[in-house]
Amino acid sequence: MVLKLKNISVSYLGKQILRDISTSFETGEIVMVIGANGSGKSTLLKVLAGLIEYDGEIVLPEGVSDVSEVTGYVFQNPETQIIGSTVWEDVIFGLENIGLKKDEMEKRAMHVLRLLELEELKDTDPYYLSGGQKQRLAIASILALQPEFLLLDEVTAMLDKNGKREVVDAVVKLKEEGKGIIVATHELNLFSAYADRCIYIDAGSIVFDGNPNDGIKLYREKIHRQFASKV
């Protein structure tokens, strides 16, 4: 499945956040979205999630009427998405809201819990989970809704080393399952070995879209120039 973005622009309170963004995303690939704070990374993910208005066009696959039907957004802080009193209840919550039959809900919930290695914790209060486990639960709850694309917004920023590794391992598994993963991140080394592409956004525009190592090098060179000019 492919999502094509054509000349996507977003403005807020008179300020342009995204400028004529044109690119595409495919299932089965991991795409890093990098750039400085305020560059437009999160805004791009929110456009893909159907959370904000935009100018331009998203070309959708046949049979899809809204981009939110095929995307799922995961926030930086997993606690903003976790609402169940147990891991199981949290995963089931979204499925109940879309009116699935009980047997289908249980089938989906067990699949994502096994996939993200949370099955043995299904009766646990999320409060007692580690940071990495909470983030995997947030991903599982979205994944149970069966989006084709996962939109991960700085999902490792609040985690320790072990938690980061747990999330990266989960992302690799989801790619193997055929999902498209779009991850906005400042942690360049964490995802670079696994990403298929890197999109570098600067001041709301795409300045690079291609090999992750080349994109990261370009980004670091700009940071170095900015630092040197202030010394």
Image: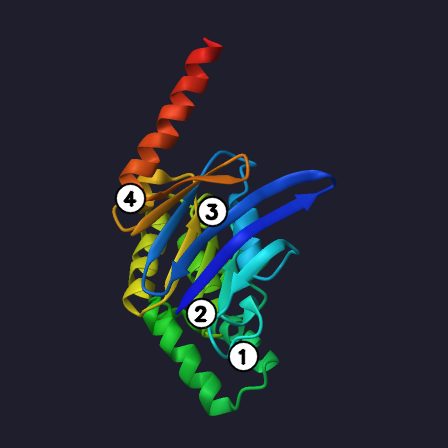
**Distance in Å between CA atoms under marks 4 and 1:** 37 Å
Name the residue at 33% across, 70% down: 115
Q: Please state which amino acid type lies under the numbered disc 4.
A: Asn
Position of residue 132 relative to residue 62, above or below, is above
Identify residue type, mark 2. Answer: Leu
Q: Residue at x 57, y 59 (%)?
A: 57
- How far across and down, in percent of the image, does residue 39 sit? 53, 37
The residue pinned by badge 3 equals 154
Please state if 168 lies on the left or on the right of 109 as rendered: left
Q: Position of residue 74 (x, y in %)?
A: 50, 58
Mark 4 and mark 3 in contact (Cβ < 8 Å)? no
Please tell me whether mark 4 or mark 2 is closer to you in this view. Answer: 4
The 10 Å Cα crowd at callout 3, few under 14, some 14 to 19, many 20 or more, is: some
Q: What is the quadrant of the C terminus in the image?
A: top left
What label does residue 143 carry, if any? 2
The residues bearing labels 3 and 4 have C-alpha atoms spaced at a distance of: 20 Å
Which residue is located at x 66 percent, y 56 percent? 53
Question: Residue 95, which numbered label?
Answer: 1
Q: Residue furthest left?
A: 193
Local secondary structure at mark 2: helix
